[in-house]
Amino acid sequence: MKIYEAITLLEKGEISPLEIAEEVIGAIKTRECDIKAYITLCDDIREQSQNAVRGGRMWGIPIAVKDNICTKGLRTTAGSRMLGGFVPPYDATVVKRLKENGAVIAGKTNMDEFGMGSDSRYSAYKVTSNPVNGLYVPGGSSGGSAAAVKAGMAMGALGTDTGGSIRQPAAFCGIYALKPTYSLVSRFGLIAFASSLDCIGAMGNSVKDVAIMTDVISGYDEKDATSANRVKEAYFENLTPSVKGMRIGVCKEFLAEASPCVKEAILKAAKRYEEMGAFVEECSIDAVRYAVSSYYIISSCEASSNLARYDSVRFGYRTENYESYEDMCIKSRSEAFGEEVKRRILLGTYALSEENYDLYYMKARIARKKIKDGFKALFEKYDLIISPVSPAKVPKAGENCEVDEIYEKDVCTASVSLAGLPAMSVPCGSDENGLPIGMQIIGDMFKEQIVLNASLCYEEGGFCNV
Ligand code: GLN
């Protein structure tokens, strides 16, 4: 059942929150042992559903929360051994807003450690499978959230996206998800990866579900210094499934990177938008060729600085035997961080060092500005840009890939993150293995409504179920 359908049935009294809870618990019982979407499952889903805020917008709706988002009294690990025993004393603003609106927290979902990765294999806890076909990866880093939603083990989920981690797993699992404009959703209570890029966003089984969740979690928060102070929009209420008269650009640089079946699916989608009344043409943004390098330099620099706080003194894992403060710090960090996190810390520290700062970090920032300006120019001409979410098909689990090859696949999503723009992942076909393909619909700053409208138009056209 979709969230918006459940809300209507609940309002009419045709279903109770407990019945919805039972449905989700049933799915968890049958599917979680194979899929492994959760790091921590809430054992009080029934009780929560009985006590949920009645009359709240999401009364009785079970939501899965990515494990790098703080939940009061509920273990929050960020997929890392470092935070294996961390129980936050407070709720992240997004969680607080969900609860105030009556939502039920189903559990905390698996993820790549601190959000660094593309298929959830870099979790210190478990490997999540794709619910569409267990032999394939669910994507990452919000792989657990995407898998939980797809398998009905939650009605919706929160994910986080620094360079694609909401959009790419949504695409791989065949669900809908929105990475909002940077600063639209509060980051208070989100365990930081790269603060100038991190966004929290909604993942669901329909565009309407994503709109409802985004309505609930977005809006100004004085606890986040970067939070945008603007009039709150009503995305769900204003949903209009139309692209009539819209100007849509299909970015050729992103298509050039795509594997044949992905390219074909995106071109088909473009054609459908044209048939639905949009004006569609090819467009170009040259600067995206710097996107992957710029993203990995900037995000790793910020990560190396953000992760310096895990010194094993104030909180986090501490090694058993040590001789000095330095020894304790080194051993704790060496034992508790995984290989990918270490790689990023090394890369970030190297790029930030005095002799390399101008060479790498400043250069990456210049490239970021070029990408931002490139998109700005495009949005003077177009209302939306479409591209693949990932240029590649969903990979098989356990396939070994070079690190740089994995990084390269972030080109379409990381560009958008560097520019801080909103973008939706919408299913638009499947590859020869039957795994989903996702289309990315990119909007200008704070134009979430247009992005959602175009996504709904596509969903209601029945094009997503291919
Ligand atoms: N795959 C990207 C990375 O590893 C994106 C991660 C994210 O958005 N959290 O950095």
Image (tube, rainbow, N blue to C red):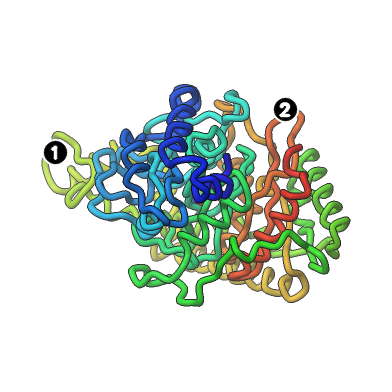
Question: Can residue 47 be seen here?
Answer: yes
Numbered disc in front, either 1 or 2: 2
Label 2 element class: loop
Q: Which mark is residue 322?
A: 1
353 left or right, relative to 262? left
**Kind of residue sitting beneath label 2:** Asn
Residue at position x 76%, y 59% in the image: 251
Tell me if residue 331 comes above or below residue 349 in the rendering.
above
**Which residue is located at x 49 percent, y 25 percent?**
31
Report the Cα–Cα distance between label 1 and label 2: 51 Å
Residue type (three-letter) at the residue carrying disc 1: Tyr
Residue 154, relative to residue 220: is it above or below?
above
Q: Is residue 205 above or below residue 43?
A: below
**Residue 87, percent from left and from top:** 24, 45
* The furthest residue to the front: 13
Please state which of residues 62 and 360 is positioned toward the viewer in this rendering. 62
Which of 247/293 is in front? Answer: 247
Give residue 433's mark. Answer: 2
